[in-house]
């Protein structure tokens, strides 16, 4: 089994319907075939407590006020990091998270108007100052959200029922967060075939994994 000295944390970000979950599972399968121990998780969710928050947020007929909504995400994030992510990293595992703190900046910050500096401060506390070793952003045009969601044939969450202007603001938020290139950031077109996305993401991840093993 390939064990990494400090583990390796991957965050997959993007709009609803971008294909984050599909990519997360494809990467986990490939990494496990290479002998890595992988933990797949998601925010909100990933713990019994977090799954209750996820259902509360996603199944609501009406979204709560933006600040209350963000604080629920922050509570989930704190529990998630303490009980799931950090223990796995200490064991040398690769953790792939479907969303992390940047989603709150994009959705509750840019999308709903919660103070972004406040979100950054609380995120840092909830995440215990831990940042992703690799962030993968699946870029999707906001006008494509509803058509992509519709293909899944599932009941829409409270977020997926939002109007197009909301997703435009969220997309602009993600673009603002990821406008500056950096070594641990990959930006991909979400409309690429899932197999192509997985290959591209894995190729870039391998470089960082090699560096991580040498630390």
Image (cartoon, rainbow, N blue to C red):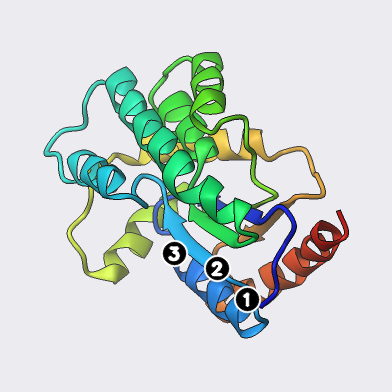
Q: CA distance from mark 1 to mark 2?
A: 7 Å
Name the residue that disc number 3 marks: 21
Along the polypeptide, which appears first: circle 1 or circle 2? 1
**Element at badge 2?**
strand
Image quarter of residue 44: top left
**Separation of marks 2 and 3 at Cα, in angstroms:** 14 Å
Q: Are marks 3 and 1 in contact (CB under 8 Å)?
A: no
At mark 3, the secondary structure is helix
Which label is found at residue 31?
A: 1
**Residue 104, position in %: x, y?**
46, 33
User: To which quarter of the image does residue 59 belong?
Assistant: top left
- Residue 158 vertical placement versus 5 (above, below): above
State the residue at coordinates (11%, 39%).
61
**Mark 2 or mark 3: whose residue is earlier in sequence:** 3
Q: Give the x, y percent position of residue 144.
A: 43, 57
Q: Are marks 1 and 2 in contact (CB under 8 Å)?
A: yes
Q: Quick one: 3 or 207, which is closer to the camera? A: 3
Q: Is residue 72 left or right of residue 90?
A: left
- In the image, what residue occupies the spot 80% across and 44% down? 181
Q: What distance separates the C-alpha of mark 3 from that of mark 1?
A: 15 Å
The residue carrying mark 2 is 38
Lower position in the chain sequence, tag 3 or tag 1: 3
Give the crowd class for mark 2: few <14, some 14-19, many >=20 residues within 10 Å. many
Q: Which residue lies at the image location 23% right of the left edge and 49% below the top edge?
A: 157
Mark 3 residue crowding within 10 angstroms, few (<14) / some (14–19) / many (20+): some
Whether residue 61 is visible: yes
At numbered mark 1, what does the secondary structure look like: helix, strand or loop? Answer: helix
Q: Is residue 176 left or right of residue 182?
A: left
Q: Nearer the viewer, mark 2 or mark 3?
A: 2
């Amino acid at each position: 089994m390939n064990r990494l000295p400090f583990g390796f944390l991957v965050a997959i970000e993007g709009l609803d319907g971008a294909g984050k979950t599909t990519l997360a599972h494809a990467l986990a399968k490939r990494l496990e075939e290479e002998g890595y121990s992988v933990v797949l998780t998601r925010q909100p969710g990933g713990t019994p407590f977090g799954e209750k928050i996820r259902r509360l947020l996603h199944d609501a007929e009406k979204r709560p006020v933006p600040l209350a909504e963000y604080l629920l995400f922050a509570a989930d994030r704190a529990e998630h990091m303490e009980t799931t992510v950090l223990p796995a990293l200490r064991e040398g595992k690769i953790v792939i998270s479907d969303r992390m703190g940047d989603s709150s900046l994009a959705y509750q910050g840019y999308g709903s108007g919660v103070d972004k500096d406040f979100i950054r401060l609380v995120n840092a506390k909830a995440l215990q100052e831990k940042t992703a070793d690799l962030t993968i952003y699946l870029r999707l045009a906001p006008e494509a959200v509803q058509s992509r969601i519709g293909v899944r044939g599932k009941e829409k969450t409270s977020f997926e029922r939002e109007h197009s202007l909301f997703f435009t603001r969220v997309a602009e938020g993600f673009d603002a967060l990821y406008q500056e290139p950096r070594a641990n950031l990959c930006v991909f077109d979400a409309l690429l075939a899932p197999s192509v996305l997985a290959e591209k993401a894995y190729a870039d991840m391998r470089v960082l994994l090699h560096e991580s093993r040498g630390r």
